Image (cartoon, grey):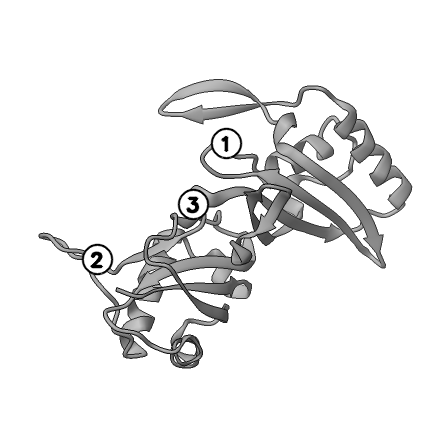
């Protein structure tokens, strides 16, 4: 049963759709495109889709990934040609390739994610001040956040999962880029980093003021992180 890896973007109005909405959109769109999608067996069969990592509602994704099993072989370019026009506004197929049907699950290969967060530059705030705040944060040995799970609160040190953090000013736009831990070993959320910059870091913005896009996903290779598409 051939398996295909799809690289797609989810931005604009699509960023407000939930992960469950996205799964439904792809189910509906593959049907409209006439793709011979394979389904699971059992009482409640569902299409054989698997995604790399859910995006929080409101966060765009410029290079997202999905694996899809088909009942028969198709040219990857034909899959993209038929599927792309049937997707809702804000979704776009970037590339399709065939992968081995025994390839590890996308989520199991994830190691880090890159994000870009932008906001309107506060009046009187400079790039020098932004970079001073970032340097101070990156020199900390521990950055503790509070998380809630199943009604319980716990402290989590996210500093080991912040691999890089940079900032800049382009015209009237303030920009922060970061590479963060994601996957089975842990997860650092971009809004947690932005909250620390906005709070103790002194950046005169709230994390909600930023528009966040996930720009890339990486696996961990022998010589360092490798784009998920190249695995």
Disc 1 from disc 3: Cα separation: 12 Å
Say whether residue 126 is visible.
no
Q: Which residue is mark 1?
A: 186
226 left or right of 32 in image? right
Quarter of the view holding residue 136: top right
Q: Nearer the viewer, residue 175 or 105?
A: 105
Measuring from the top left, give residue 141's x and y in whole percent: 71, 19
Measuring from the top left, give residue 150's x and y in whole percent: 35, 25
State the residue at coordinates (9%, 52%).
43
Q: How many marks?
A: 3
Q: Foreground mark, 3 or 2?
A: 3
Disc 1 from disc 2: Cα separation: 28 Å
Measuring from the top left, give residue 153's x and y in whole percent: 46, 19
Disc 3 from disc 2: Cα separation: 19 Å
Quarter of the view holding residue 201: top right
204 left or right of 91 in image? right
Quarter of the view holding residue 40: bottom left
185 left or right of 214 in image? left
Crowding near pointer 2: few (<14 within 10 Å), some, many (20+)? Answer: few
Q: Which residue is mark 2?
A: 46
Crowding near pointer 1: few (<14 within 10 Å), some, many (20+)? Answer: few
Q: Which residue is mark 3?
A: 107
- Can you name the residue that lies furthest to the left here? 43
- Which of marks 3 and 1 precedes in the sequence? 3
Is 16 rendered above or below residue 165?
below
Which quarter of the figure is the N terminus placed in? bottom left
Q: Nearer the viewer, residue 206 or 62?
A: 62
- Which of marks 2 and 1 precedes in the sequence? 2
Q: Name the element at disc 1.
A: loop
Q: Nearer the viewer, residue 226 or 207?
A: 226
């Amino acid at each position: 049963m051939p398996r295909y890896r799809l690289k797609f973007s989810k931005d604009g109005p699509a960023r407000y759709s939930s992960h469950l909405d996205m799964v439904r959109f792809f189910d509906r769109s593959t049907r409209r495109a006439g793709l011979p999608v394979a389904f699971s067996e059992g009482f409640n069969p569902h299409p054989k889709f698997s995604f790399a990592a859910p995006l929080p509602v409101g966060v765009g994704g410029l290079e997202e990934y999905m694996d899809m099993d088909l009942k028969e072989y198709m040219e990857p370019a034909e899959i993209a040609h038929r599927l792309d026009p049937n997707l809702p506004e804000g979704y776009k197929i970037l590339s399709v390739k065939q992968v081995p049907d025994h390839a590890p699950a996308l989520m199991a290969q994830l190691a880090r994610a890159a994000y870009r967060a932008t906001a309107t530059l506060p009046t009187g705030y400079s790039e020098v001040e932004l970079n001073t705040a970032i340097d101070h944060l990156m020199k900390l040995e521990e950055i503790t956040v509070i998380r809630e799970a199943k009604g319980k609160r716990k402290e989590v040190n996210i500093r080991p999962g912040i691999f890089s953090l940079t900032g800049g000013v382009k015209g009237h736009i303030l920009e922060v880029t970061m590479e963060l831990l994601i996957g089975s070993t842990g997860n650092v959320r971009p809004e947690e980093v932005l909250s620390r910059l906005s709070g103790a870091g002194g950046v005169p913005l709230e994390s909600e003021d930023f528009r966040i896009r996930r720009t890339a996903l990486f696996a961990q290779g022998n010589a360092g992180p490798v784009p998920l598409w190249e695995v």
